[in-house]
Image (cartoon, grey):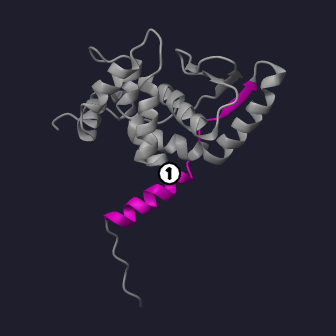
């Protein structure tokens, strides 16, 4: 009889990574709002088919909450990306390169998870997102990619101060972001802080 194979932390991590890659991604429907956006919608649909499960699993791991079992409609259009207040609709600009699509899709889907989190004083939608988005990007595409995305997002013009939100989030260590995130997870789903810890 062969001796049992010892299971160490590295083996568990590999098993968890494999299981996460098999996870089902939330169902997304890519809808062009005009016929000329149909080619971009088709490309995005194909990319989601190839990478969606990995993106969803990385976000769920980093946020510590699962995606709700609800479909998400992705409207492909000519306009800034955004996620609706209820998270059931995402708007994406047509014509993204693969890396801009990856960053934008991960950002907007991250908003879908951030909606499920509670709020504390001073934590708006982007600050809640930035508690886990950097880790998800790093897990998916490496730290260099994540740092480039942060640099790009810091320069987004408009009424919202992305630079300040990133400065706030990245002033904390990963462990500090995770500790704060744990206080925002909904206890009814079993993801909140455990009493006595």
Which residue lies at the image location 42% right of the left edge and 45% below the top edge? 144
The picture places residue 4, in percent across and down from the top left corner, at 37, 81
Residue nearest the observer in this picture, 158 or 115:
158
Give the quadrant of the N terminus: bottom left
The picture places residue 152, in percent across and down from the top left corner, at 46, 29
Give the quadrant of the C terminus: top left
The picture places residue 19, in percent across and down from the top left corner, at 50, 55
Name the residue carrying label 1: 20
Q: Is residue 16 magenta?
A: yes
Magenta-drawn segment: 9-31
The residue most toward the left is 196
**Res. 116 visible in picture:** no
Residue nearest the observer in this picture, 126 or 89:
126
With respect to residue 119, does 58 lie above or below? below
**Res. 172 visible in picture:** yes
The residue most toward the top is 159
Which residue lies at the image location 66% right of the left edge and 26% below the top edge? 74
Q: For mark 1, does the 10 Å Cα neighbourhood hold few (<14), some (14 to 19), or many (20 or more) residues?
A: some
The picture places residue 177, in percent across and down from the top left corner, at 28, 34
Question: Count the marks: how many?
Answer: 1
Question: In this image, 41 relative to 72: left or right?
Answer: right
Question: In this image, 55 relative to 130: left or right?
Answer: right
Q: Quadrant of residue 164?
A: top left
Which residue lies at the image location 42% right of the left edge and 31% below the top edge? 151
Residue nearest the observer in this picture, 53 or 196:
53
Question: In this image, 136 relative to 78: left or right?
Answer: left
Q: Secondary structure at mark 1?
A: helix
Q: Is residue 177 magenta?
A: no
With respect to residue 161, does 31 lie above or below? below
């Amino acid at each position: 009889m062969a001796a049992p194979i010892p299971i160490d932390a590295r083996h568990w991590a590999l098993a968890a990574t494999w299981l996460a890659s098999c996870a089902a991604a939330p169902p997304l429907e890519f809808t062009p709002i005009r016929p000329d956006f149909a080619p971009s919608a088709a490309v995005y649909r194909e990319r989601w088919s190839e990478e969606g499960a990995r993106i969803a699993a990385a976000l769920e791991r980093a946020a510590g909450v699962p995606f709700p079992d609800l479909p998400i409609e992705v409207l492909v259009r000519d306009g800034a990306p955004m996620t609706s207040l209820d998270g059931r609709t995402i708007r994406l600009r047509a014509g993204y390169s693969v890396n801009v699509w990856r960053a934008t899709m991960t950002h907007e889907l991250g908003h879908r998870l951030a909606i499920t989190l509670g709020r504390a004083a001073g934590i708006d939608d982007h600050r809640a997102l930035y508690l886990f988005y950097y880790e998800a990007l790093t897990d998916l595409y490496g730290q260099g990619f994540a740092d480039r995305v942060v640099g790009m997002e810091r320069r987004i013009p408009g009424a919202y101060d992305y630079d300040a939100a990133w400065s706030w989030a990245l002033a904390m260590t990963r462990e500090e972001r995770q500790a704060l995130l744990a206080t925002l997870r909904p206890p009814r789903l079993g993801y909140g802080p455990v009493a006595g810890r």
